[in-house]
Image (spheres, rainbow, N blue to C red):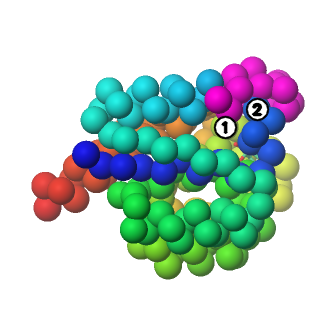
Amino acid sequence: MHKILILNGPNLNLLGSRQPDVYGHETLAMLEQRCIDHGTALGLSVVCEQSNHEGVMLDLLHGARSLYAGVILNAGAYTHTSIALMDAIFSIELPVVEVHLSNIHAREEFRHRSYVSRAALGQICGFGSQGYLMAIDALDTHLNKDTAG
Ligand code: DQA
């Protein structure tokens, strides 16, 4: 059974109450439970983590290398600033799917650049929490393709 990590970054603990017009009304706990259920239905074990701290996120990514088959990452605002997160993704050599609730390309220009994208398998954005389920499907397909050789 593949085990995957869903890592949410800064301010995503505030989902549900944070700018609901942009990020929706669903709380992080609700979103995480939907991801776990979706993963279970696919035969995946899903573990969810969230941190507001770049260094903690780096440590979680480093640790993921030996624990998980892949990662789904919403790095929040660190997406647009963190070369360190990009380097960590390159270093761990795991498939990482980048997710954003909002369509970052339709928002302020500073959100258009993603350092995460340079190292990620791909990016899903603009579909709200559904994007996480799409990312699980994408990672599952990718991992099964790898298994099939
Ligand atoms: C976000 C988009 C980022 O630009 C923003 O800083 C976030 C959330 C999203 O999920 O849409 O915190 O990653």
| Residue 123 visible in this rendered orientation of the protein | no
Q: Position of residue 139 (x, y in %)?
A: 38, 48
Magenta stretch encompasses residue 17: yes
Residue nearer the viewer, 91 or 131 = 91
Q: Secondary structure at mark 1?
A: loop
Mark 2 is on which residue type?
A: Leu
Q: Is residue 81 above or below residue 90?
A: above
**Tag 2 residue:** 15
Secondary structure found at label 2: loop
Is residue 41 in view from this perspective? Answer: yes
What residue occupies the far left of the structure in this picture?
A: 148
Q: Residue at x 43, y 68 (%)?
A: 65
| Quadrant of res 33 | top right
- Sequence-wise, the earlier of marks 1 and 2 is 2
Q: Which residues are magenta?
A: 16-29
| Residue with the mark numbered 1 | 101
Image location (x, y in percent) of residue 136 = 42, 40
Q: Quadrant of the C terminus?
A: bottom left
Tell me the crowding category of disc 2: few under 14, some 14 to 19, or many 20 or more residues within 10 angstroms, Cα based: some
Give the numbered dot on residue 25. none
> In x, y percent, where is residue 5?
48, 51
Pick the front one: 62 or 122:
62
State the residue at coordinates (66%, 62%).
57
Whether the residue carrying mark 1 lies under 8 Å from ligand 1 is answered with yes
